[in-house]
Image (cartoon, helix red, strand yellow):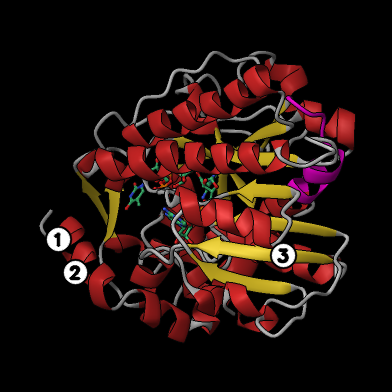
């Protein structure tokens, strides 16, 4: 749809969701489009290698959904969209999101994640300040990551599985909303910088902002450069599974639809200028989660259990590889009543099944340019 022929239908809210063709963004767009038929949802995405409109075919024709191909760094374009669609809310997910790519190409991360966020903030500021009601009823919601907090020690090496009361046992051994920023990778440094800009726009201009910092997501539509979809696909095709270092690093895994539910809740009920951590209380050492993935793929493909364990190939560690991430999301539970709805066992079963059932999607995204990058990155190890 061009800007000239937009309909004049009245919507209760007009919300830009950036990065809506990516992994998490597509789940958020789908949730909002289906749950709020009286909201106009404008999916703004540049369609980089990570953005794929095939993630959203089920909602393509909905009357409250619009896709706009645009770069968040294109300040004039964002200004135009704000005005044309009377935008009163922004949920900002667009980003370069893969740590390994940031190590090879930090400039792209600074451009998109820092300057792109600044461009959105400034465009929103100019439009909202030009309205008679100013910032009233407006919201700029920035989606960030737990990686801005740095890395934790391995104090309970087995990890904590689905244990929402874990913080009572382990006290401060988590990232809290008050944890000092200490990013290590170019990716996390760029996300930390964008978080600072968002806070600055609240503190300087009074923009109604909210930030959330979430742990590792897993689920359908994740680009297969990230651990879980990459390994599912490699196991299926009996390709090596490149485990960085000794596989001892720990991540806290959350099913992507639970993240989308949290975003919905926080967008509507979160406190302005506040920060909420979102996590699964679901820590796994990489090597342990890899074994679960191998067993699940083998079982669902009718292979002998553990048949593919020898695909595990230990490779050179990621530079500056953060040892452990673990989020304390108690504040979100106490203040807004959110907690993960899925046990990990169910989430991983669903996820593996989805990738095995959607080989066309996988083949589509692993072809072309991405395939070339993939070959260069892993096959030379
Ligand atoms: P993704 O890489 O799957 O998707 C990113 C999307 O942003 C793609 O659709 C891409 O086309 C779009 N995009 C990239 N650059 C753009 C630009 N300049 N202009 C417009 N669109 C652009 O990312 P994801 O994993 O879905 O992550 C989404 C957000 O959530 C990111 O901000 C990320 O930092 C954050 N996050 C991700 C995780 C995770 O585990 N994946 C966890 C916590 C936070
Ligand atoms: O914590 C939230 C972050 O989680 C998000 O902000 C990022 O956007 C997202 O990419 C993710 O970052 P990670 O670096 O933790 O995810 P990734 O899937 O790349 O790696 C998970 C772990 O697995 C990590 O310790 C590195 C390891 N790994 C990864 C790949 C791709 C391997 O051992 N081998 C691999 O091939």
Q: Nearer the viewer, residue 201 or 178?
A: 201
Q: Quadrant of the N terminus?
A: bottom right
| Residue located at (67% from left, 48% from top) | 90
Label 2 crowding class (10 Å Cα cut-off): few <14, some 14-19, many 20+?
few
The percent position of residue 184, horizontal first and vertical second, equals: 36, 25
Task: Find the distance from the CA under tag 3 to the CA under tag 2.
Answer: 34 Å
**Residue 145 placement (x, y as % from top left):** 54, 36
Residue, disc 1: 376
Q: For the stretch drawn in magenta, what is the main secondary structure? A: helix
Q: Residue at x 74, y 25 (%)?
A: 274
At 82% from the left and 39% from the top, the residue drawn is 132
Report the residue at 88% width, 60% height from top.
12
**Side of 318 relative to 30 (left or right):** left
Q: Bounds of the magenta span?
A: 262-273
Quarter of image, res 308: bottom left
Q: Is residue 265 magenta?
A: yes
Regarding mark 1 in the picture, which secondary structure is present there? helix
User: How far across and down, in percent of the image, does residue 252 sit?
Assistant: 57, 39
Q: Please name the residue that numbered disc 3 is placed on.
A: 41
Q: Which mark is residue 131?
A: none
Assess disc 1: are there few (<14), some (14-19) or many (≥20) residues with their C-alpha within 10 Å of its C-alpha. few
Q: Can you tell which of label 1 and label 3 is closer to the viewer?
A: 3
The local crowd at label 3, few if under 14, some if 14 to 19, many if 20 or more residues have their Cα within 10 Å, is many
| Horizontal arrangement in the rendering, residue 85 relative to residue 122 (left or right) | right
To which residue does mark 2 refer? 372
Q: In terms of image quadrants, where is residue 200?
A: top right
Q: Is residue 161 visible?
A: no
| Looking at the image, residue 95 lies above or below residue 211 | below
Of the residues under marks 1 and 3, which one precedes in the sequence? 3
In the image, is 213 to the left or to the right of 375? right
Disc 3 within 8 angstroms of ligand 1 (CB) = no
């Amino acid at each position: 749809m061009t800007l000239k022929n937009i309909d004049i239908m009245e919507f209760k809210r007009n919300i830009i969701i950036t990065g809506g063709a990516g992994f998490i963004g597509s789940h958020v767009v789908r949730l909002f489009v289906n749950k709020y038929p009286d909201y106009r949802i404008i999916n703004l995405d540049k369609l980089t290698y990570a953005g794929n409109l095939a993630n959203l075919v089920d909602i393509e024709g909905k009357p409250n959904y619009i896709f706009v191909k645009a770069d968040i760094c294109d300040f004039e374009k964002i200004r135009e969209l704000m005005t044309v669609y009377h935008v009163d809310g922004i949920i900002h997910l667009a980003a370069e999101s893969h740590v390994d790519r940031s190590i090879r190409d930090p400039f792209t991360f600074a451009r998109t994640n820092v300057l792109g966020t600044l461009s959105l903030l400034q465009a929103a500021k100019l439009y909202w300040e030009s309205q008679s009601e100013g910032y009233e009823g407006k919201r700029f919601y920035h989606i960030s990551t737990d990686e801005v907090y740095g890395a934790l020690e391995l104090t309970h090496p087995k990890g904590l599985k689905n244990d929402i009361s874990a913080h009572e046992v382990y006290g401060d051994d988590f990232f809290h909303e008050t944890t000092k920023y200490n990013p290590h990778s170019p990716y996390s440094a760029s996300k930390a910088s964008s978080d600072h800009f968002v806070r600055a726009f609240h503190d300087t201009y009074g923009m109604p902002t909210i930030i959330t910092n979430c742990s590792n997501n897993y689920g359908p539509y994740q680009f297969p450069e990230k651990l879980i979809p990459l390994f599912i696909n490699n196991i299926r095709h009996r390709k090596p599974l490149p485990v960085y270092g000794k596989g001892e690093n720990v991540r806290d895994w959350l099913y992507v639809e639970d993240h989308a539910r949290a975003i919905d809740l926080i967008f509507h009920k979160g406190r302005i200028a506040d920060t909420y951590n979102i996590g699964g209380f679901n820590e796994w050492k990489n090597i342990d989660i890899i074994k679960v993935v191998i067993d699940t793929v083998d079982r669902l493909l009718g292979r002998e259990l553990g048949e593919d364990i020898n695909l595990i190939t230990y490779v050179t560690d990621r530079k500056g590889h953060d040892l452990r991430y673990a989020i304390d999301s108690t504040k979100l539970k106490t203040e807004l009543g959110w907690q993960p709805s899925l046990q990990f066992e169910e989430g991983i079963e669903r996820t593996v099944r989805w990738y095995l059932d959607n080989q066309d999607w996988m083949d589509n995204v692993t072809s072309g340019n991405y395939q070339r990058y993939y070959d260069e990155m892993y096959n030379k190890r």
